[in-house]
Amino acid sequence: MENDEVYERIRTLLIDEFEVPPEAISLSANTREDLKLDSLDHVDLVVELERFAGRRIESDELTTLKTVGDVVDLLRRYLADDSTSAVAATEVEDQSRHEPEVITQSGSDAD
């Protein structure tokens, strides 16, 4: 997903769920000072971000989320990690289909 797509999803979320005026939203907008999100709003925002990313956001990363741009960057990393993991899993699965099966005899058939 491109940065513009992630930004638009975050922008829509802020407008629809948190009633942030559209003109207040920019990549450099501070979520507390410029968008007026309080601590409870931040909890709700994190829940929505985790739904969007499809995974939990690490607590140490939450402290780095100051601006809308920080949120967009974090989600891009999470989504890129997921797509990289999916590609790697597909490659491993494809390789296992092409490797010859090794058959070993167990027990003693030689008499």
Image (cartoon, grey):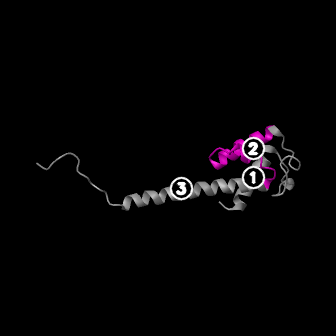
Disc 1 element = helix
Instruction: Determine which residue is flagged by label 2.
Output: 45
Dividing the picture into quarters, in which one does residue 92 lie? Answer: bottom left
Q: CA distance from mark 3 to mark 2?
A: 26 Å
Tell me the distance, in whole angstroms, between the alpha carbons under discs 1 and 2: 10 Å
**Which residues are the magenta region?**
40-68
Binning the other alpha carbons within 10 Å of mark 2 as few (below 14), some (14 to 19) or many (20 upward) gives some
Q: Main secondary structure of the magenta part?
A: helix
Residue contact at pointers 3 and 1, CB within 8 angstroms: no
Residue 22 picture location, percent across and down: 83, 53
Instruction: Give amino acid for label 1.
Output: Val
Residue annotated with mark 1: 71
Pinpoint residue 75: horizontal percent, then vertical percent: 69, 53
Is residue 8 at all visible to an observer of this figure? no
Q: Residue at x 79, y 53 (%)?
A: 68
Query: Is residue 49 shown left or right of residue 37?
Result: left
First in residue order: circle 3 vs circle 1: 1
Q: Which residue is mark 3?
A: 86
Q: Give x and y (percent) for residue 96.
A: 39, 58
Residue beneath the point at 65% across and 53% down: 78
